[in-house]
Image (cartoon, rainbow, N blue to C red):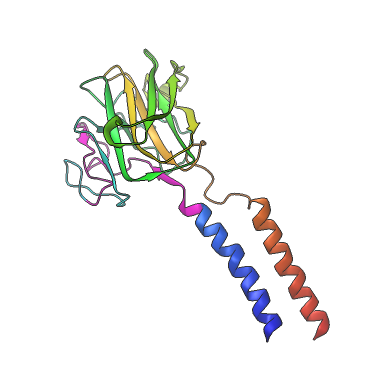
């Protein structure tokens, strides 16, 4: 019985490590910020990811994340549907093709994460006329210390005519940092840059939801399997 419990414990440890690693990565895909698809209006993100709603009354997962009052959800074009001048062009996560983040006033918008996040930050973006930047801070609304920053270059417009979009497709960007971040500035010229798949805990945006296990997880699983084989031989 003790030997069998040891095998169970090894398998449980491997499973918990996998769950914890997955739980550290959060992706904001901005799907559903606008009440309808396609939508000709731009909905304010507001508390969509903070236990509340967007300006159109829709709500997403409560991650404790709020956006500045100029942060908007933009409708993204798909084949046969035109609702803006922006599209993912069929690239990236197929479940993240309908909505993105942008702003029409000011030269930046902020995202606040009161609980903080670590390790890295990443995203996809499109900016075919003017570039921009992102900056990560250790206090809310750009306060405290600057933990990381990244200049965002102009991106090519490479999509086919079936997407009817000048801002298409999107390019990946990301930064790693030390410390605990609590806010991010998304900066650039108004109406000239769009973001999607904002990802916390990874320098690669919207990472594979079924990643190859890390070496320490593989070791635990190998030990578990070896123990199981040994017990079978003893039976």
Give the quarter of the figure containing the C terminus.
Answer: bottom right
Q: How many marks?
A: 0
Q: Is residue 91 above or below residue 209?
A: above
Q: In x, y percent, where is residue 21?
A: 53, 53
Residue 193 seen in render: yes
Q: In x, y percent, where is residue 133?
A: 39, 21
Residue 83 seen in render: no
Q: Residue at x 20, y 43 (%)?
A: 54
Q: Is residue 15 above or below residue 96?
A: below
Judged left or right of residue 10, residue 227 is right
Q: Does the magenta run of residues contain 29?
A: yes
Q: Residue at x 26, y 48 (%)?
A: 50
Q: Is residue 116 above or below residue 174?
A: below
Main SS class of the magenta portion in the image? loop
Q: Residue at x 73, y 63 (%)?
A: 222
Front residue (pair 43, 232): 232
Using the rendered view, name the quadrant where residue 18 is placed. Answer: bottom right
Front residue (pair 75, 131): 131
Q: Residue furthest front?
A: 144
Q: In x, y percent, where is residue 231?
A: 77, 80
Q: Which residues are magenta?
A: 22-51
Give the quarter of the figure containing the N terminus.
Answer: bottom right
Judged left or right of residue 56, residue 201 is right
Using the rendered view, name the quadrant where residue 183 is placed. Answer: top left
Q: Residue furthest top?
A: 129
Q: Does the magenta run of residues contain 59?
A: no
Q: In x, y percent, where is residue 76?
A: 33, 32
């Amino acid at each position: 019985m003790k030997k069998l419990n040891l095998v169970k414990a090894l398998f449980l440890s491997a499973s918990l490590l996998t769950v914890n690693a997955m739980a550290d990565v959060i992706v904001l895909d901005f799907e559903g910020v606008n009440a309808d698809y396609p939508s000709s209006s731009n909905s304010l993100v507001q508390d969509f990811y903070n236990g509340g709603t967007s300006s159109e009354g829709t709500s997403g997962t409560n991650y404790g994340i709020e956006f500045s009052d100029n942060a908007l959800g933009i409708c993204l074009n798909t084949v046969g549907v035109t609702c803006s001048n922006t599209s993912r062009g069929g690239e990236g996560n197929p479940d993240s093709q309908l909505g993105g983040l942008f702003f029409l006033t000011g030269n930046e918008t902020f995202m606040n994460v009161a609980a903080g996040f670590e390790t890295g930050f990443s995203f996809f973006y499109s900016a075919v006329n003017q570039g921009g930047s992102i900056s990560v801070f250790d206090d809310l609304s750009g306060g405290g210390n600057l933990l990381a920053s990244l200049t965002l270059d102009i991106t090519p417009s490479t999509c086919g005519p079936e997407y009817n979009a000048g801002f298409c497709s999107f390019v990946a960007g990301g930064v790693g940092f030390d410390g605990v971040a609590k806010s991010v500035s998304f900066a650039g010229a108004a109406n000239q840059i769009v973001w999607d798949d904002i990802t916390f805990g990874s320098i690669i945006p919207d990472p594979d939801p079924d990643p190859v296990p890390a070496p320490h997880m593989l070791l635990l699983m190998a030990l578990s399997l070896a123990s199981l084989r040994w017990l079978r031989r003893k039976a």
